[in-house]
Image: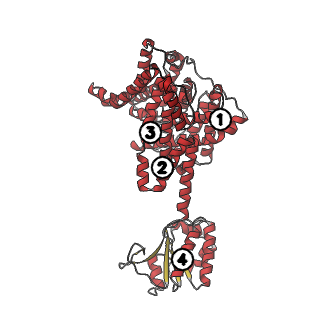
């Protein structure tokens, strides 16, 4: 059985799957690889420059990770390479350290090595679930603000103005102050390229369908706007009547494996940002893979993806690249191009090899404004405020986390904004966990049991039935004890207290100690504590404890049994 249906992935899932394909399906993998490479070339160069790196580093970054993923990856649509958000994180991290521009490439490689190391640590200690603590609201606010930062950071290159740094407002003020330096040439070329990208994104697929191109091919070719724009720019540049800032010479040849030059300063400065980038990269890659796998009813092995992504970042570092992941755009194109196995990444890598060996000279006259337009066109759709509106309407806490991440990124920096958003989301989670919902329940006329505050139920003067709707732990057991004390103060006739444990499947040791002390104190007041509806996992946890042994005759199978027994209707206790 292949990795797509087994309980654990094979060592080389793509090769196993490839053997089962027909000739036409294998050809689809080849075509998908070529299309993905066609998208990777302009994107890779543009995202490298977004990070403040030479354009060829974007191609280097994709090459070795594509080969690795082709062998060991489990998603047939993932296309490893630079991503706009990761490139922004790399650039912001390096600029914040005030290192010389000449050292950017080496520090970026060190950063990729540390990102890969963190991902492997998460894999070996099975900590991939840490991403679950980055709430969707935080990620949405972080992504929206980061996309806005990407757009603003590229406006200088699009308009031919000097680059600036700082938060969003500092960059906007710098652009406003430099407005008088504008000449017509670069803005005209850059804005034209951006409009061409937007037009092709919106109407190219429809135009190809109108020209009777098969629908599948039209969908795929409709996504190649960046490549078409790049080719058009190279054709127009020689006859353009004014000077433009250009990419310049792109070295030919393949990157030879080499370790980056380490320094203690670099490791001390980059280890913490590397963890943030590692988490962002993993969230991006696994969410893209799982979303598209669900569409085709396929399975993704998140643990395998974690170590493959870690190894891919280490390979990127060893081949003069920077941190790598998979973006949604390339994955969608790979999917629509008909990719059948991860081997499509192999054909994309082989295409990049050919370009690096024989075609890099073609890119030298490419205007930087075109690459800026490609980045802006890719980032702008991510600027979406609707999730904030939905989150705020449903949960003010989620809306606050969204806004905190958004404002933090714009004012303080990308990593700082993410940390603030995650911190607020975790604080809210802990606050909710420490204040569990607790209900006093009584009997309905039909014999059922419901919350006294929501239903008209029968309550007996001597009986207090309490249902905590959460697991009990050190952070919330105090709240349960306070709730019981308040209600007992209002009900002086209570002699029997039943804890209905239908919603509890775990009690930690601190909560168990507090429960035992609570019972002892209530016994001094003449109140007997009973338990009802112990769930299987909780019974297993308490099976060998003194607590359950001493309470065995005071454990009821159901709330109904507790009610009947304690109202003297049925004296038979049942465990």
Q: CA distance from mark 3 to mark 1?
A: 27 Å
Closer to the eye: label 3 or 1: 1
Query: Which element carries disc 4, helix, strand or loop?
Result: helix
Say if 520 sits above or below 324 in the image: below
Q: CA distance from mark 4 to mark 2?
A: 36 Å
Query: Which element carries disc 1, helix, strand or loop?
Result: loop
Mark number, residue 421 = none
Mark number, residue 486 = 4
- Image spot of residue 43 (x, y percent): 48, 28
Observer-nearest of 160 and 74? 160
Q: CA distance from mark 3 to mark 2?
A: 14 Å
Which residue was labeled with disc 1? 97
**Mark before the other along the chain sequence, 1 or 2:** 1
Q: CA distance from mark 1 to mark 4?
A: 55 Å
- Image spot of residue 165 (x, y percent): 57, 33
The residue drawn where x is 69% and y is 35% is 266
Rate crowding at label 4 as few (under 14), some (14 to 19) or many (20 or more) other CA atoms within 10 Å.
few
Which residue was labeled with disc 3? 382
Q: Is residue 114 visible?
A: yes
């Amino acid at each position: 059985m292949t990795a797509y249906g087994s309980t654990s992935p094979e060592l080389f899932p793509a090769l196993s799957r490839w053997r089962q394909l027909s000739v036409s399906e294998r050809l689809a993998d080849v075509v998908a690889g070529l299309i993905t490479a066609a998208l990777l070339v302009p994107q890779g160069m543009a995202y490298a420059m977004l990070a403040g790196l030479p354009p060829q580093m974007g191609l280097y970054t994709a090459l070795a990770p594509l080969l690795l993923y082709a062998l060991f990856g489990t998603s047939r649509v993932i296309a490893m390479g630079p991503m706009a958000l990761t490139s922004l994180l790399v650039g912001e991290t390096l600029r914040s350290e005030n290192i010389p521009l000449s050292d950017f490439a080496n520090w970026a490689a060190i950063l990729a090595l540390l990102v890969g190391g963190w991902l492997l640590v998460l894999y070996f200690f099975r900590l991939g679930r840490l991403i679950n603590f980055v709430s969707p609201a935080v990620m949405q606010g972080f992504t929206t603000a980061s996309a806005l930062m990407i757009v603003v950071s590229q406006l200088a290159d699009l308009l031919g103005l000097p680059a600036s740094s700082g938060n969003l407002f500092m960059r906007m003020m710098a652009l406003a102050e430099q407005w008088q330096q504008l000449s017509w040439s670069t803005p005209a070329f850059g804005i034209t390229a951006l409009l061409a990208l937007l037009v092709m994104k919106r109407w190219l697929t429809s135009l190809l369908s109108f020209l009777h191109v098969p629908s599948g091919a039209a969908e795929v070719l409709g996504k190649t706007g960046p490549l078409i724009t790049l080719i058009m720019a190279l054709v127009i540049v020689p006859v353009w009547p004014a000077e433009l800032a250009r990419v310049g010479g792109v070295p030919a040849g393949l990157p030879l494996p080499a370790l980056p030059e380490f320094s203690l300063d670099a490791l001390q400065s980059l280890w913490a940002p590397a963890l943030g980038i590692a988490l962002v990269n993993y969230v991006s890659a696994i969410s893209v893979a799982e979303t598209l796998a669900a569409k085709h009813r396929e399975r993704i092995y998140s643990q395998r993806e974690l170590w493959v992504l870690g190894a891919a970042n280490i390979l990127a570092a060893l081949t003069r690249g920077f941190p790598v992941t998979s973006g949604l755009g390339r994955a969608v194109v790979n999917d629509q191009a008909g990719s059948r196995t991860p081997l499509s990444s192999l054909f994309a890598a082989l295409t990049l090899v050919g370009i690096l060996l024989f075609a890099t000279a073609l890119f030298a006259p490419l205007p930087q404004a075109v690459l800026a337009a490609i980045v802006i066109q890719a980032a702008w759709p991510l600027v979406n405020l609707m999730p904030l509106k939905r989150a705020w309407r449903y949960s003010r806490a989620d809306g606050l986390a969204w806004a905190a991440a958004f404002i933090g990124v714009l004012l303080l920096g990308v990593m700082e904004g993410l940390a603030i958003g995650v911190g607020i989301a975790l604080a809210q989670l802990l606050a909710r966990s420490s204040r569990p919902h607790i209900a006093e329940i009584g009997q309905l006329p039909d014999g059922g049991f419901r919350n006294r505050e929501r239903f008209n139920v029968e309550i007996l003067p001597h009986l207090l039935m309490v249902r905590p709707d959460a697991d009990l732990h050190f952070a919330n057991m105090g709240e349960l004890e306070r709730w019981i004390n308040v209600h007992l103060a209002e009900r002086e006739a209570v002699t029997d207290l039943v804890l209905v444990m239908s919603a509890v499947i775990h009690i930690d040791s601190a909560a168990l100690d507090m429960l035992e002390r609570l019972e002892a104190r209530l016994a001094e007041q003449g109140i007997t504590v009973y338990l009802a509806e112990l769930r299987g996992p909780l019974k297993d946890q308490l099976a060998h404890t003194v607590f359950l042994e001493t309470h065995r005759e005071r454990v009821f199978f159901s709330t109904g049994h507790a009610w009947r027994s304690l109202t003297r209707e049925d004296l038979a206790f049942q465990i």
